[in-house]
């Protein structure tokens, strides 16, 4: 499974997961999935409810990451028990 990278917003109500798409057929570009979700319980108790998934070129995903960091999002480790992906 590809390694995932997580961001959380400042009040810990929303998360984003960035994960490489290892099954992409495009031999010239690499793509990332960017999953968005809502935290619906106490932090770390239940996994977030994932609401959307985008597939972005790796360079575009990096720009999205930088934009979110500039808006106050912070890197976090996955703290939920189930590993989906």
Image (cartoon, rainbow, N blue to C red):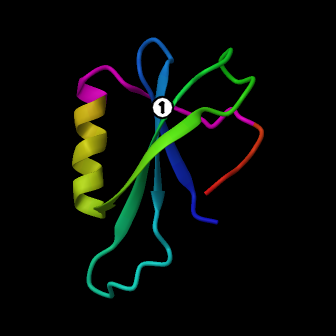
| Position in image of residue 66 (x %, y %) | 25, 38
Residue at (75% x, 23% y) in the render: 45
- Residue at (23% x, 26% y) in the render: 70
Q: Is residue 56 left or right of residue 34?
A: left
| On screen, residue 1 above or below 13 | below
Residue at x-position 50% and y-position 74%: 22
Residue of label 1: 15
Asked whether, in this view, residue 54 is left or right of residue 77, the answer is left
Please, what secondary structure does the residue beneath circle 1 have?
strand
Residue under the point 75% across and 44% down: 82
When the figure is inspected, residue 38 is found, relative to residue 53, above or below; the finding is above
Numbered marks: total: 1
Magenta span: 69-80
Label 1: how many residues lie within 10 Å, few (<14), some (14-19) or many (20+)?
many
Asked if the magenta segment contains residue 48, the reply would be: no
Residue 34 at x, y percent in the picture: 40, 50
In percent of width and height, residue 35 lies at 45, 47
């Amino acid at each position: 499974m590809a390694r995932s990278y997580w961001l959380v917003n400042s009040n810990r109500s929303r998360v984003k997961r960035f994960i490489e798409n290892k099954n992409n057929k495009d031999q010239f570009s690499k793509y990332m999935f960017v999953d968005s979700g809502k935290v619906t319980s106490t932090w770390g108790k239940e996994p977030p409810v994932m609401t959307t998934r985008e597939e972005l070129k790796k360079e575009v995903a990096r720009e999205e990451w930088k934009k979110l960091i500039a808006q106050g999002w912070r890197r976090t480790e996955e703290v939920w028990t189930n590993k989906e992906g």
